Each structure stands twice: as structure tokens, then as C-alpha cells.
């Protein structure tokens, strides 16, 4: 039997030391985040104006100071929207299968395996695949749609993984409660499981959107490139914000570099805005808010 | 509204593991039947076979017959969903749907099966909440989330949800084990009231509760460790607690083992 023990000085010191290490690690992790934001905002503000947001690069000479990213903003929004329209339903249904129906069978295990493989596919490869298959083999033209196809390949595994995780978090109790009321399985999934996991799934989808919105490599080979506004994602080359940044940053003039920074700032703002909207939707869709 | 359940030669399995063996009993309508016995002896498993909830667990299956007023629940053409509409269930832990309000929770069974108008629904929700002795506590906040209620209120909400679909039988799997004595009393009073309308089956670890509320009691036990559970004895509750015919029952009830 030992009595009540007091915390020794050495343990106290160790505790403080480790605590300090944790704070230090946190500070180190925040440094790149803050510095990236600082750089992008301070450099991007120079050209971040209405002119930039409402004009394309059509007819802008090499040394002209104006011109903007309107065509790229339109392109990015359309491509990401189309990519989401493809990958969110497929990803969500895959996750539902894995969690609710697969039950660790051979099919669900192989699906899981291939989803993992897809997560590891470099974005260039996704672009190359669409380029080789959709454009060279099937003979379609460069278009926003081709870009969306490439992006959806990158988006799908992220959506599957996050939706799967969220569905697994829904307690089995709730499914049982629903079954015990004589509710069929698919209705239980639609009316009980999905609403319960809704907020988490939305967050997961937004992370996937944020990931693909900044992809440059797959766009290079699929939407090609343009300086003009093209509202139709199904015909002709489009632009995307990452491409815009990549292009402008590579030009030798200060005006172009300013446009690149402004483009990067726009991209960050778009992703943040989408996140905000998603959070609002999630908050508004959760009837059980407040007590 | 109330139906009799007849079980004969029922075995239940989890994969290759046999959890209960050769259970036969008759559960009378408009009465409360209690299942008692040590943990892991298959009471809950048996309860879940009565409304085909057992098979929800992967690999679980059942052999034998369960007749609801003569109709075999395990006949190949019977839809498990329809069985569960007739035989409701209340679980050990209160599990209201977290995304739904109090009103929606009670209405869930009817709404999710899609067959009632709004005005009808209002009536049924009120009636069910009154039936579960919860109406007076929640009538002013029907649109508040069900998860915001206390544990005892949540459990009564779950009972209201179960009786809203007008089942013939109500199965209760240790409905009071997570509740304080006052909430427990509220639920026991409720059971006494509900037995006028429903056949009630309750699994409980609380001997006094079984003695207080039930009309008949079945004692489950394992023949020995690792063997499937069996019904040792089933009789009128008064006789079970005063003069059981089996030594094992007496030992268990008087607290000599288990």
C-alpha cells in the first residue's frame, strides 16, 4: 500500500517541457499557413479590383496593365461544379454501398482497395488519362467538360472516403430504431442515416472541392487554354484559375505577375466562400440545432 | 389490438455460434411477460427473434417457429418489415433520432412508411405522447429536438414512437437500465397502463421490477459456460418468485448466483 503521492519536481518539469514542445509544434505548423495567406493577400491586393473580376485577357498585350480573370473564374466554377455533379453522387452511393450493404464482403473489400489506389493517383496522371482517352482516342475537343472529367477522378476517392467515415459514425442504434418501426432499409438510409451524417458529408465534399479547385496539371491537358470568355463548358477550350495563375506567373512582366497573385487570391476566396456556403447549408439543414 | 405469440423449438445463431437453443413458450395477449436471467444467456437475443430484429446483425439466423396468432413470422413469404410494424421495440438505451424534433420522432414510424395526412398525424402524435405519459411535459416544445430531453423523457419518447405505429406487441429490452428510479417508476406505471392494449414483453435485470410489473416470468440460463442459453422455467410471476419448481431459478432469484 502506498499513500497519496505528490508529483515530483522532475515530472513537473517534464510536463512543462512537453507542453512547450506541443505549443512550438503548433506555432511551426501555423507559420506556413499564415505566411502563405499573408503573401497572397499582400501581393494579390494590387490587382484585386472590379476590373480584374469582370474582364478576360482577350486583346491584352504583353505590357498592358489591365486585363482580368473573369474567363478563368467562370471556367473554374463550371469545371468544379461539373466535377462535383459527377463525383458526388457516385462517391456517395459507393460509400453507402460500402457501409450499409457491402458488410466487408469481397466486392466491398476490392472497392475499398481501388478507392485507396485512386487516392494515390497523381493529378497529372488523371489529366493524361482523360487526354489520352477522351480527346485522343474518342476524338472529342478540349473543353471544360474534359477538365471536369479529370477533376472528378481526383475528387471521387476523397468523397468516398469522407462520406464512408461519416456514415460509419452514425450509431447502429438509430438504424435499429428505424428498422424496429417497420421502416425498410433503403428508407432508413435516406431518412435517418443520411440526414444524421449530412453535416459531415457536406464538409467532406467541400474538402474534395477545395482540393480539385486548385489543380493545375489535369487542366493543362484537358481544358487547354484560352484568353477569351467561354461560357460553354462542353465546346472549345476554357480557362481555369490555377491555369491562369500558372500562365501569368510565367510571364516576364510585373503586371502579369500581379495578375497571378490576384488570381491566387481569387482562388482562395472562392474556396473559402464555398466552404462558408456549405457550412450555412449544413447549419440550416440540421433541425436539431439548439436546445 | 393485442395478439398472442407462440414460440416452438426456436434456435438462434450468430454465424456458427448457437446463442439460444430449443426455446418454446406462449406469450399471452394483454399481459406483461418478463424475461430474467444472467447476462449473456440469450434473453435479448430471444426478444429480438420475436420481431425479426435478430437477423439485422450480419450472419445471424433463426431456426424454429414463431407464431403471431397462428401466423408464422418466419414463413418464407413474410416480409420482415411488416412483422416489425406489428411488433414494436424499445431499446436499452434511449435512441431518439437526433435530426428530428420531438414531434417528428413520434411521427417517424408513420411518416417513413408514408401513409398519413397531417391532421391525422397531429392526432396520433398527441395520443401516443399521452399514451407514453409524456404529453404534459413536452406539449409546448414539440418542435424542439428529441435529443434535448432527459434520459427518462427520451425513453418515454421512444415508447411513444413505438406505439405510434399501433403495434400488436411491444418488446422492451431492458428499457429502464439506463434510467434513475423516478424515471423507472414512470415507465413501469406506463407499462401497467399499456398492457390493456398491447402484449408486452420485457427483458430486465432487475428482479424487483420483474416481480412488480409482470404477469408471467421466464427464467433464462446457460446450461453451462459456452453452451447456448435455454429457458429454465416459465410460470406465473407470483409463483416464480415464491415457489419456483427449479432449484436454479430459486438460486438466481434469491441472489445465490448470477
Image (cartoon, rainbow, N blue to C red):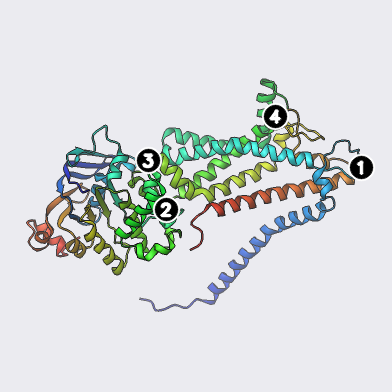
Query: Measured from the top left, where is residue A189 in percent x and y?
Result: 44, 43
Is A87 situated left or right of A263 in this image? left
Query: Measured from the top left, where is residue B214 in percent x and y?
Result: 18, 59
User: From what the image shows, is residue B25 above or below residue B205?
Assistant: above
Which quarter of the rendering shows the N terminus of chain A?
A: bottom left
Query: Upstream in the sequence, badge 1 or badge 4?
Result: 1
Query: Measured from the top left, where is residue B40 in percent x and y?
Result: 25, 53
Residue located at (44% from left, 77% from top): A5
Q: Nearer the viewer, residue A148 or A23?
A: A148
Query: Measured from the top left, where is residue A116 in percent x and y?
Result: 55, 38
Q: Secondary structure at mark 2?
A: helix
Whole-number angstrom distance, CA of label 1 to CA of label 3: 65 Å
Whole-number angstrom distance, CA of label 3 to CA of label 4: 41 Å
Q: Residues within 10 Å of mark 2 (few under 14, many from 20)?
A: many
Whole-number angstrom distance, CA of label 1 to CA of label 2: 62 Å
Residue located at (23% from left, 51% from top): B43
Whole-number angstrom distance, CA of label 1 to CA of label 4: 31 Å
Of badges 2 and 4, nearer the viewer stands 2
Residue at numbered disc 2: B104
| Circles 1, 3 touching at the beta carbon (< 8 Å) | no
Amino acid at each position: 500500500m502506498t499513500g497519496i503521492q505528490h508529483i515530483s519536481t522532475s515530472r513537473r518539469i517534464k510536463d512543462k517541457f512537453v507542453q512547450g514542445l506541443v505549443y512550438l509544434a503548433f506555432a511551426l505548423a501555423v507559420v506556413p499557413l499564415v505566411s502563405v495567406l499573408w503573401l497572397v493577400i499582400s501581393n494579390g491586393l494590387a490587382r484585386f479590383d472590379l476590373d480584374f473580376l469582370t474582364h478576360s485577357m482577350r486583346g491584352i498585350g504583353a505590357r498592358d496593365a489591365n486585363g482580368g480573370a473573369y474567363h478563368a473564374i467562370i471556367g473554374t466554377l463550371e469545371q468544379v461544379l461539373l466535377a462535383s455533379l459527377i463525383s458526388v453522387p457516385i462517391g456517395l452511393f459507393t460509400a453507402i454501398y460500402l457501409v450499409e450493404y457491402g458488410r466487408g464482403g469481397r466486392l466491398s473489400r476490392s472497392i475499398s482497395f481501388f478507392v485507396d489506389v485512386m487516392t494515390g493517383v497523381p493529378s497529372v496522371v488523371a489529366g493524361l488519362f482523360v487526354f489520352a482517352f477522351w480527346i485522343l482516342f474518342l476524338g472529342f475537343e478540349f473543353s471544360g467538360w474534359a477538365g471536369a472529367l479529370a477533376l472528378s477522378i481526383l475528387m471521387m476517392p476523397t468523397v468516398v472516403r469522407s462520406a464512408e467515415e461519416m456514415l460509419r459514425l452514425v450509431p447502429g442504434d438509430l438504424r435499429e430504431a428505424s428498422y424496429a418501426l417497420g421502416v425498410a432499409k433503403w428508407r432508413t438510409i435516406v431518412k435517418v442515416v443520411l440526414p444524421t451524417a449530412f453535416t459531415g458529408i457536406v464538409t467532406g465534399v467541400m474538402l474534395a472541392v477545395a482540393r480539385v479547385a486548385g489543380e493545375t496539371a489535369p487542366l493543362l491537358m484537358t481544358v487547354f487554354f484560352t484568353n477569351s470568355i467561354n461560357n460553354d463548358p462542353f465546346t472549345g477550350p476554357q480557362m481555369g484559375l490555377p491555369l491562369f495563375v500558372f500562365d501569368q506567373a510565367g510571364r516576364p512582366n510585373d503586371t502579369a505577375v500581379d495578375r497571378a497573385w490576384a488570381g491566387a487570391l481569387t482562388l482562395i476566396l472562392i474556396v473559402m466562400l464555398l466552404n462558408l456556403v456549405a457550412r450555412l447549408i449544413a447549419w440550416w439543414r440540421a433541425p436539431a440545432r439548439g436546445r | 389490438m393485442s395478439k398472442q405469440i407462440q414460440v416452438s423449438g426456436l434456435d438462434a445463431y450468430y454465424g456458427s455460434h448457437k446463442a439460444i437453443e430449443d426455446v418454446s413458450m406462449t406469450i399471452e395477449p394483454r399481459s406483461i411477460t418478463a424475461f430474467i436471467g444472467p447476462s449473456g444467456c440469450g434473453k435479448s437475443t430471444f426478444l429480438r427473434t420475436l420481431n425479426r430484429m435478430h437477423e439485422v446483425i450480419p450472419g445471424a439466423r433463426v431456426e424454429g417457429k414463431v407464431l403471431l396468432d397462428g401466423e408464422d413470422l418466419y414463413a418464407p413469404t413474410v416480409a420482415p418489415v411488416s412483422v416489425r410494424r406489428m411488433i414494436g421495440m424499445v431499446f436499452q438505451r434511449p435512441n431518439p433520432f437526433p435530426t428530428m424534433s420531438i414531434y417528428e420522432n413520434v411521427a417517424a414510424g408513420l411518416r417513413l412508411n408514408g401513409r398519413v395526412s397531417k391532421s391525422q398525424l397531429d392526432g396520433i402524435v398527441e395520443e401516443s405522447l399521452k399514451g407514453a405519459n409524456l404529453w404534459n411535459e413536452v406539449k409546448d416544445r414539440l418542435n424542439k429536438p428529441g435529443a434535448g430531453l432527459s434520459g427518462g423523457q427520451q425513453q418515454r419518447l421512444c415508447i411513444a414512437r413505438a406505439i405510434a405505429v399501433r403495434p400488436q406487441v411491444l418488446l422492451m429490452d431492458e428499457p429502464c437500465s439506463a434510467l434513475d428510479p423516478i424515471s423507472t417508476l414512470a415507465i413501469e406505471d406506463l407499462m401497467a397502463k399499456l398492457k390493456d392494449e398491447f402484449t408486452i414483453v420485457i427483458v430486465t435485470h432487475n428482479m424487483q421490477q420483474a416481480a412488480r410489473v409482470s404477469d408471467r416470468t421466464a427464467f433464462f440460463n446457460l446450461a453451462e459456460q459456452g453452451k447456448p442459453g435455454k429457458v429454465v422455467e416459465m410460470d406465473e410471476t407470483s409463483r416464480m418468485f415464491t415457489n419456483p419448481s427449479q432449484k436454479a431459478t430459486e438460486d438466481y432469484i434469491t441472489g445465490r448466483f448470477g
